[in-house]
Image (cartoon, grey):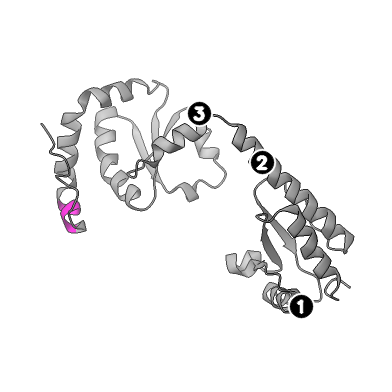
Amino acid sequence: MEIKKNQYYFKDMDYYICETPKILLELIDERKDILKDALVQLKEEQKELILLGSGSSYTAAQTVKYFLQKMTGKIVTLLYPNNVLHYEILNNSSAAVIGISQSGNSVAAIEAITGDQSCVEQTRNAYKERRDAFLTNAKKIGWKIDKTKGTMFIWAKIPDKYKTSFDFVDDLFNQTGILFVPGSAFGSYGEGFVRIALIQDIQTIEKAFSLINKTNIFK
């Protein structure tokens, strides 16, 4: 069945809620060959399909879940990406993981993964150098911080003389103009820490610690 261009584009949410199954059936009928090729890629030992989606993509995945179960005869589980905290569930040979995207950004994601990785190495090295510079300067003023193994963030324990992470952030800002994010902004487990994003260059980091060292915050 031919689908006219933009036939379903300018519709309200109520329309999609009521008509999504009909739309999907028409799209599936139109793209049977594509779907057949995709399903061939699923290995026989993969007994489960895990769909990852958020926002409107999650809503779309809720609808497609039924059709996938019917077409493949496999168990289909739907998850938000942030629910897969440690990725153990993805490291499962009996499961196939499918990312759901309605925006077209998945094409860009494939290019980012399979394309030239030199920019990734440059970015990783930049964050590593900034992390090392931050920790070295922190040690000089007596601020002991555990060395993070990855990510662009540092979680640092606040000095003992401050009752809350906000008190520390407030005092630091008033004395130096430097602003960190209080750990309490991320929930009760973040209290007693600050989160620092390594977005500044090394020269700026060293200047920041020079200003901090002129205060009595760590003395």
Q: Residue at x 16, y 40 (%)?
A: 5
Question: Quadrant of residue 153 in the image?
Answer: bottom right
Q: Residue at x 79, y 52 (%)?
A: 133
Q: Which residue is mark 3?
A: 114
Q: Is residue 109 visible?
A: yes
Q: Which residue is mark 1?
A: 175
Can you name the residue that lies furthest to the left here? 1
Q: Magenta region: which residues?
A: 14-18
Q: Secondary structure at mark 2?
A: helix
Residue 160 place in picture, x, y as percent: 81, 72
Mark 3 Cα-neighbour bin, 10 Å: few <14, some 14–19, many ≥20: few
Q: Secondary structure at mark 1?
A: helix
Going from N to C along the chain, the mark reached first, 3 or 2, is 3
Q: Amino acid at mark 2?
A: Arg
Q: Nearer the viewer, residue 192 or 218?
A: 218
Q: Secondary structure at mark 3?
A: helix
* Magenta stretch holds residue 16: yes
Can you name the residue that lies furthest to the front here? 203
The C terminus is located in which quarter?
A: bottom right
Left or right, 192 with reference to 95: right
Q: Amino acid at mark 1?
A: Gln
Q: Does the CB distance between marks 3 and 2 fall below 8 Å?
A: no
Residue 18 place in picture, x, y as percent: 15, 52
Residue 208, compared with residue 75, is above or below; it is: below
Q: Amino acid at mark 3?
A: Thr
Q: Which residue is mark 2?
A: 124
State how far apart marks 1 and 3 are (Cα).
Answer: 47 Å
Left or right, 76 with reference to 189: left
Q: Nearer the viewer, residue 125 or 23?
A: 125
Residue 50, compared with residue 16, is above or below; it is: above
Residue 16, compared with residue 194, is above or below; it is: above
